[in-house]
Amino acid sequence: MSHRDFRRGKAIAFTLFYLVLLYLVITIIGMLSLKSQSDPISDPWFTLMEIMIIIIAPLLVMLMAEIHYYASDDVKALSMSALIFMGIMACITCSIHYLILFVSRPIAAMTGLPWLSYIFSFKWPSVIYALDILAWDLFFALSMLFAAPVFKGDRLKSWVRILMIVSGVLSLIGLLGPVLGNMQVRNIGIVGYAVALPVICLLLARVFKKAE
């Protein structure tokens, strides 16, 4: 591989590492503030989580673009597929969370229609929830799985490849939640992108640093 500049990729990976960790901290604080575990996370934590996702998703696309730039010619088709899948994920999830922030609340305040929960809530079943599962448990998972073969060689790259595969597989398992009618199963998918992702980003930052 010829010498190329991966400082941008390193910066994006580090930024995502800290942002995803911040998202996890906000989520934990939001959950600890609940009076009942059956209650949804309330503001300001919920709004902060929505904003964080809208920021994180485009950065994930940028990260995949850097991975495609890093990839050797024999895996360029796979890395391009990973980039496309992540782009689809970002489009879906950004649309969802933008609608939640700026459309669902005004409509609910004006109308109070009970059936709106079947469109805009994160309580199953709802349209928004189904699309969010599609975005993260399918397209994010596919992106991870297609990006994994890019990393081969030393121990660091092997760990990136292994964790990407684990992340992708766990995320795909989350698709079984709606199929089985048990949304607790979907939590397995959440581990794939909420827990594995920051570790992957940190390792990717090291990979890009070594490639400089």
Image (cartoon, rainbow, N blue to C red):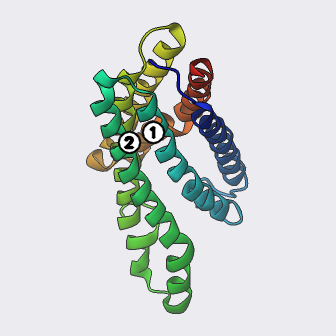
Residue closer to the observer: 173 or 102:
102
Q: Return the residue nearer the eye: 189 or 87.
A: 87
Q: Nearer the viewer, residue 56 or 182?
A: 56
Q: Residue furthest bottom?
A: 110
Checking the image for residue 107, the label placed there is none
The disc labelled 1 sits on which kind of residue? Met
Q: Is residue 184 above or below residue 53?
A: above
Give the number of the disc on residue 83: 2
Position of residue 100 relative to residue 108, above or below, is: above
* Disc 1 target residue: 64
Residue at the image position 55 percent from the left and 77 percent from the top: 102
Q: Position of residue 39 (x, y in %)?
A: 59, 61
| First-in-chain label (1 vs 2) | 1
Q: Is residue 78 left or right of residue 208?
A: left
- State the separation of the CA atoms marked 1 and 2: 5 Å
Amino acid identity at mark 2:
Leu
Q: Quadrant of the C terminus?
A: top right
Are the two marked residues, 1 and 2, in contact with CB atoms closer than 8 angstroms?
yes
Q: Position of residue 4 (x, y in %)?
A: 53, 26
